[in-house]
Amino acid sequence: MNFRLLAALMTTTMFSTVIGFSAPPAPSGGEALAAAGDASGVANLRLPPVGEQRALDLVDASEPEGLLPDQTSSIKLYWKLLSFSCACGGKVHLYVDGKYKGYATGAGTYTVRRLKLEGGRKYTFYAIDECGTTAWGPSRYRMKSSWSTFTWTLTCTGGGITPTSGSWTGTTSRGQPMSYQVISGGTQYRYFKLKTDFDFGSCYGTTETTVTSTGSISNGSFGSTGGTFGYTGQFSSATSATGTYQYSGLYIYPCGYLYQTGTWSANWASSALADGAEREAGEPEQPGRSNKVTIEHIDATARER
């Protein structure tokens, strides 16, 4: 018996090989999407209805990217998004060989499925964001080796969308108004204002949060997290944007603590800036966050004693 050959075979079964590929620069805009759709039958792909979409699972940090000993005829597929800034709509959908596999909602490594090895044939990968404005692929890779894993790695490249400077206005998923300003040639924003309603049963009303400080717009996205109020935004064009917001324990006296999530959409409204346009060259006089609460009804039993 060739003991050297046996030892080599045993060694290959003890380790998995992670193969990472960076996707080509992510195109954006209708022309780029049409060009991607003309190859390998991608033009026939359509985003599934909302009811048929499914979220992919993130790989737990403690989970090794590998295979179990009885999986010798398959290869484990992972999908890694290094950045998410150029994705519009909060989701990126993945197709393998023209079949829908699910969507990702942010940067990270996702478990997709096992691919059955069939004589080292090529597999076709294609990804597209929720708005249909940015696409990756189609990319084709030949799978040969068992006892290995394959990771398709994507990243956002390029400068993204540059929004139009001025006042932006929109509404939330609860039908409440929101607004913000884009300044400095589309590289910064400020005065992010969002109103929402709440109902604690015996106490209900509205609260409006204004973040007056200036933030950066990078690769067509912006946002702020942490504290009791956070938000994200992504520009789908120079004059339109969508985003999310979240209240995490904002105390409304004497009602209680507000926990709420939602989405918003906005469009460029005017080149004129409201709420202190004369200070565009500098910072707001009082940067930070302010809240204005209107309580429409409160039951006596809900008051603090």
Image (tube, rainbow, N blue to C red):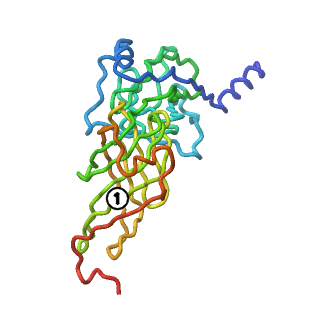
Q: Position of residue 123 (x, y in %)?
A: 46, 18
Tell me what residue is drawn at x 42 percent, y 47 percent.
278
| Residue 191 appears in view | yes
| Residue 74 appears in view | no
Q: Secondary structure at mark 1?
A: strand
Tell me what residue is drawn at x 36 percent, y 53 percent.
193
On the picture, is 217 further left or further right than 145? left
- Say which amino acid is labelled 1: Gln
Which residue in the rendered view is the most extreme toward the front? 278
Q: Assign the C terminus to one quadrant of the image.
A: bottom left
Nearer-the-camera pick, 300 or 152: 300
Looking at the image, residue 1 lies above or below residue 300? above
**In this figure, which residue is indicated by the disc labeled 1?**
260
Which residue in the rendered view is the most extreme toward the top? 39
Tell me what residue is drawn at x 37 percent, y 46 percent.
180
Q: Position of residue 29 (x, y in %)?
A: 37, 23
Tell me what residue is drawn at x 42 percent, y 30 percent.
161
Q: Quadrant of residue 136?
A: top left
